[in-house]
Image (tube, rainbow, N blue to C red):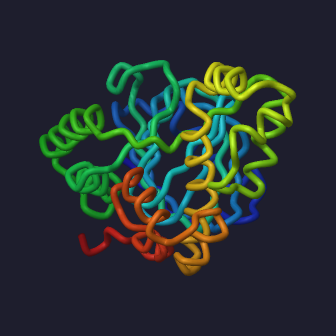
Amino acid sequence: MRKIDFIASGQTEVDDPHYASLDWIEVANEPVLALGRAYPAGFNVPEHSHRRTQLWFARRGVVLVSTSSGRWMIPPGHALVIPAGLQHAIDVISDVDMHSIYVHPPATGAGGPPRVVEVTTLARSLIAELVEADDRPLSPRRQGLVMELLLEEVANLPDKPLGLPVPDDERLARLCRDFLKAPSARASIDDWAARLGTSRRSFTRFFREETGVSFGTWRQQACLFASLPRLADGEPVTQVALEAGYENIAAFTTMFRRVLGSAPSHYRKARRDPFHDA
């Protein structure tokens, strides 16, 4: 095991510990690698890939991971499973404490898109045990048991619908990009269909073909993406809800609970580790 704790800053690629750790990940022989990092809001990691599957766990803060086919947001208490070999870039939305686990593909399954998962109490404890092994060394037997149980737990973590597909069609992609700049729960299918010069029925079918989800689901996800960073920065729930196009806080809270299982207020203090005392 190895832990790398640092505050990523404006360092160059040559001396940035982030790039040093990427090199280490590629050459290390251990079956499971564990890293701990702290990133400031606004930090960006250019497109890259790993030869191992990565579990990117946000203990606090909000992170956006982008690939050629979509975007995935990681709120506090969640993780993104990034398949080995997948090119991805990272944008840190708010100050983040991250624990990351790297394993060989057969352990968690190879291929397929990334998936956002809710990190259980057990998985969180096992990850921390490995990340903190430098400060509290584990016996070989205990380390092996922790690794084995963690891999079993990761394979069964519950999925959360926090991905946002990017359509291939350039006209539709342009509408989606514009919407992401100012998401609104009131956006209508009829308006988008008119802007593409097609009927409601044709647009509905076309949108699903391009993204794999309904327009309503995509719109909800986009609004959630826009809301999470603002909540993490401590903005009032009512203000965030109204500016996202929801008529009242109750409707916004219902949507939030349905998708994430927690009220919006749970994410307002994401600068603090919400699971520190769990």
Q: Position of residue 266 (x, y in %)?
A: 40, 71
Residue toward you, 85 or 205: 205
In the rendered image, residue 172, in percent from the top left (x then y), is placed at 79, 31
User: What's the residue at 78%, 42% (across, down)?
Assistant: 191
The quarter holding residue 169 reads: top right
Name which residue lies at 84% across and 30% down. Answer: 196
Relative height, residue 253 to residue 238 (above, below)? above
Q: Is residue 17 visible?
A: no
Q: Residue at x 14, y 45 (%)?
A: 142
Please say whether residue 83 is visible from this viewpoint. yes
Viewer-side residue, 270 vs 21: 270
Q: Is residue 245 above or below residue 74?
A: below
In the rendered view, would you say 85 is above or below 227? above
Residue 129 image offset from top left, x and y in percent:
26, 55
Quadrant of residue 9 within the rendered picture: bottom right
Residue 53 is situated, as x and y percent measured from the top left of the image, at 45, 30
